[in-house]
Image: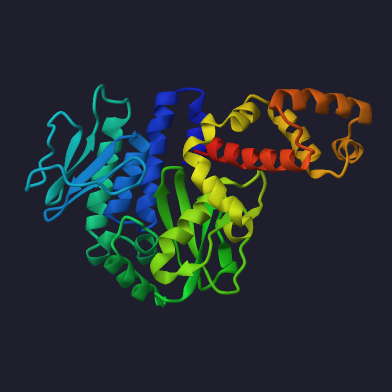
Amino acid sequence: MQELVGRLTALDPEASETLKVVAYFDVLVAGGVGLQALLRGAAVLSGAVAGAFDGRRTYRIGPDGGRLADRTTSDGTAAQQQWPTRTINNGRVWLEREGTPHANDEMVIERLALAVDLVGARGPGRHGSALEIAVDAARDVAERRIALSRLRLDPARETRIAALPLSHDPGTALPTAASTVVATPYGLVRAVILGRDATISGPAGVGVARRGDQLPESFRTALLALRLLPANDAVVDAAELGVVLAAVSALEPVAALEPDVAALARLDARARAVLDELAAAESVRAAATALGMHHSTLQARHDTLTSELGYDPRTLDGRARYRLARLLLRLVENH
């Protein structure tokens, strides 16, 4: 499917997007997710609130993945009848699209309805995998504790969650690990439980250790670490970031507006690579050797880039500014 999407992108962008929607829900269903994860996926894909009434309860999920209050009637009828809606077994699903419908709304709602019916046919497992529930901050504590018992995890014992790109299979390196597919605002990722002494190959983000009943926080930091990955198969451990983790978490909502981040965003990849080496090397001469450049050429480049940034990334304060701005830019680019 992924190969087919790639081949069709240049020929028919609209058809390509349709196939991506189909593939997206196929992966979620195959991953054993539940109703709320499917709604989260639909909300992320469409950029609109996704809702469902399953015959008993109404669920509404926003594009950021958060649960929203019920705005429907007692029988699950959507408040706005013009919203894209589909009937499912014992209920209905819908997208709360305000204004002009988007091109793929009908495909998203159609695949959502089909996926919900397929999940419902599972019976008791329709609410999702235990790990999916355990890392979901929108679930209440009681639900997460039941999920922990299914996973045989002690709520008081510290556990780490790793977040991996969907294409990365942890393989047999973690024979006892539980994993699940999770729909996030940044795409589908694979969440994996790491044992006490387990290691994992990259690319991956590893969350901070948290009590079993606080696994959503471990998953949040694992996802943040994954988005901070450089362009290689590295592993970023959130615990090793220290105070930097708190800084990037706090600044992420306004990162794109920060002048230091905006200045980096205006530069091309080559210029950023030069700055990376300048900030890391002991001297300009050492950086020139690593980059395969003549010392005088790099010195002139350094002077130009320093002027564009408004500070020198080789000074003590400049290194701190540059490294924080570099991490924040990765978050902006991986939004």
Above or below, comparing residue 203 to residue 175 in the picture:
above
Count of marks, rendered view:
0
Is 173 left, or right, of 287 in this rendering?
A: left
Is 65 left, or right, of 116 in this rendering?
A: right
Residue 56, percent from left and from top: 12, 56
Above or below, comparing residue 251 to residue 301 in the picture:
below
Measuring 40% from the left and 77% from the top, which residue is drawn there? Answer: 152
Q: Determine which quarter of the picture holds residue 72.
A: top left
Q: Determine which quarter of the picture holds residue 317.
A: top right
**Residue furthest left as drawn:** 74
Front residue of this view, candidates 3 and 245: 245
Is 98 left, or right, of 73 in this rendering?
A: right
Measuring 24% from the left and 36% from the top, which residue is drawn there? Answer: 95
Measuring 29% from the left and 34% from the top, which residue is drawn there? Answer: 107
Does the image show residue 326? yes
Front residue of this view, candidates 156 and 57: 156
Does the image show residue 167? no
Residue 229, percent from left and from top: 61, 47
Front residue of this view, candidates 137 and 258: 258
Residue 211, percent from left and from top: 44, 70
Q: Colour scheme in the image?
A: rainbow
Above or below, comparing residue 241 to residue 52 in the picture:
below
Residue 231, percent from left and from top: 66, 42
Q: Determine which quarter of the picture holds residue 81.
A: top left
